[in-house]
Amino acid sequence: MRGMVIVVLVFLAGCAGKTTRQAEETELGRLASLMAPLEASLNPRPKACLVIEKTEQINAAVTFVSSDDEGRCTHSLVVTEGALRSLTDEQLQAILAHELSHYTLGHLDAYAKRHKIKMAFKSVFFVISQITWIGYAIGNVGSLATDAVSNAYTREDETAADLEGAKFLREASLKWHGPNRPSGCDQMPKTLEILRQHSGDNLWADYLGDHPSLPTRILVVQAYCADL
């Protein structure tokens, strides 16, 4: 099958096995066929380990693979059961374009470095927390602070992935002549609107969350597409 090579992973590193499952053959085929137009021009092509997360939430993510899977996969692609069940092929393709952009823009490498630093600091804070009751307080506060500043992707990363994903969709709509050809740049803001309807996200998320709000993301991508 043309397109991204998807390798099945039974477990995602760091996650309990009960929250993920092995992908079914039909899911592998669907995702590979939707990715094919997006990554046709990439050389070398990414090789993703596919993880299905057992939740009805609509989401997807790109994360690094464990040391045991290095060399076998370039990254892990996590897709929720909710996304597979609720999204049309066109909508799911836009989500995949966003996640592919995190990989091609190098966001995953930056996240991996932050994660290693995070784990090193958490180890230090754990040792401190074992010394005295004061150390316990300092160690736990330090560990929580480390978690707070080491999220997978920044707001800037998310915006960049939205725009790069929209660009992937536009270029594939012009160059791809096989099945699952994207409809164009506007496919991204339309899909973000679907996600907004499902999540109820609002402008307050700009101030309360580690991602830009979906309304803001929609406006930014619409303006980008209008300028192309």
Image: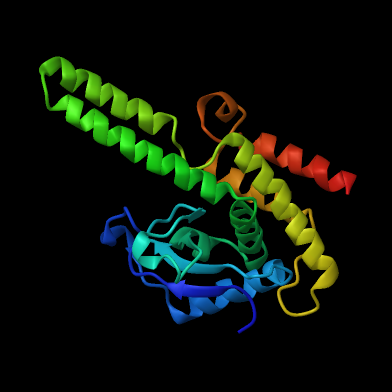
> Can you give x and y, in whole percent of width and height, for residue 31 in the image?
56, 71
Does residue 22 appear left or right of residue 60 in this picture?
left
> Is residue 120 among the parts visible in the rendering?
yes
Farthest bottom residue in view: 1
143 to 59, vertically: above or below: above
> Is residue 193 among the parts visible in the rendering?
no
> Can you give x and y, in whole percent of width and height, for residue 217 in the image?
68, 39
Considering depth in this image, is 85 or 184 the residue closer to the camera? 184
Does residue 207 appear left or right of residue 165 in this picture?
left
Q: Report the residue at 17% width, 22% height from top.
A: 136
Considering depth in this image, is 10 or 195 the residue closer to the camera? 10
Q: Quadrant of residue 66?
A: bottom left
Q: Quadrant of residue 173?
A: bottom right
> Can you give x and y, in whole percent of width and height, for residue 57 in the image?
45, 52
60 to 152, vertically: above or below: below
Q: Report the residue at 59% width, 55% height from top.
A: 103
Q: Report the residue at 17% width, 26% height from top.
A: 129
